[in-house]
Amino acid sequence: MIPWLIFGVIALGLGIAAWRMRIAKGGVTMVLSALALAGAGYAAQGQPGLAASPAQAEVENEGELASALIDLRDLMDRNFGAHKSWLTMSDAALRDGDYARALAMIEGGLKRNPGNSELLNARALVLFLASDTQLTPAVQLAFATAKTSTWHPGPYYFEGLAQLAARKPEEALALWDVALTRGTPNGEWRPPVTAQRDALARMMA
């Protein structure tokens, strides 16, 4: 299980730091703000006694963002089958910022497990991070391909992050609504994503 309380405090600190510095550009900043909403919302729901002032935190590199997204994706996955070893190797490379190796591991897995929904979603996430969270044509195609799965919430959630990074909150909200109709009803990923979706809706209102 992810230590969501810790994640929430760190993410909230990152988001507040970004807003205080008035950083208006950069996809990574937008995604970190989105993660702040998710973590803070979940922490507030799960820990009502949590202090209002979060601890200060710094991001040493983009590996922290990749790790947070990998952990959330892992909660969305079913995580069984022969493809798991390919995901494990890809995730290790992605946490180190080695996008080429991470993608190569995913492609290797897809050759042996064509159409696997978890591998397709992981490929979309790798391309999303490799593009500096920009919604490039390659990223768009990867998300569209991953959506062929009838159950996985990941493609809709991560494309929502990409839309948020592109300053399209309406599209992000619509995609997160779809994501919440997918996956298992009691999945551990659901509370933080729901909190993130609700926080974005409040901001838009």
Image (cartoon, rainbow, N blue to C red):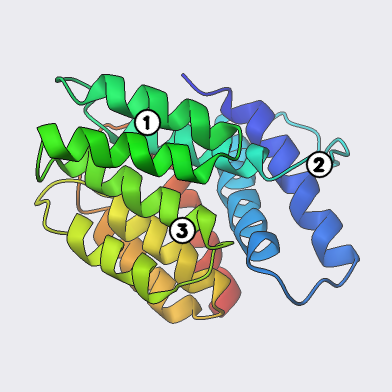
Residue 67 at x, y percent in the picture = 56, 34
- Determine the secondary structure under disc 3: helix
Q: Do the residues labelled 2 and 1 touch (CB within 8 Å)?
A: no
- Determine the secondary structure under disc 1: helix
Residue 95 at x, y percent in the picture = 57, 33
Question: Which quarter of the rendered picture does the C terminus lie within?
Answer: bottom right
At 38% across and 63% down in the image, what residue appears? 159
Q: Mark 3 points at which residue?
A: 128
Is there any visible trace of residue 37 in the rendered image? yes
Name the image quarter holding residue 108.
top left
Q: Mark 2 points at which residue?
A: 52
Badge 1 local density, few (<14 within 10 Å), some, or many (20+)? some
At 30% across and 59% down in the image, what residue appears? 156
Q: Name the residue under label 1.
A: 74
In the image, residue 20 sits, relative to residue 125, either above or below, namely below
Foreground disc of the pair 2, 1:
1
Q: How many marks?
A: 3
Question: Which is nearer the eye, 81 or 9?
Answer: 81
In the image, residue 116 sits, relative to residue 170, either above or below, namely above
Q: Is residue 76 left or right of residue 8?
A: left
- Determine the secondary structure under disc 2: loop
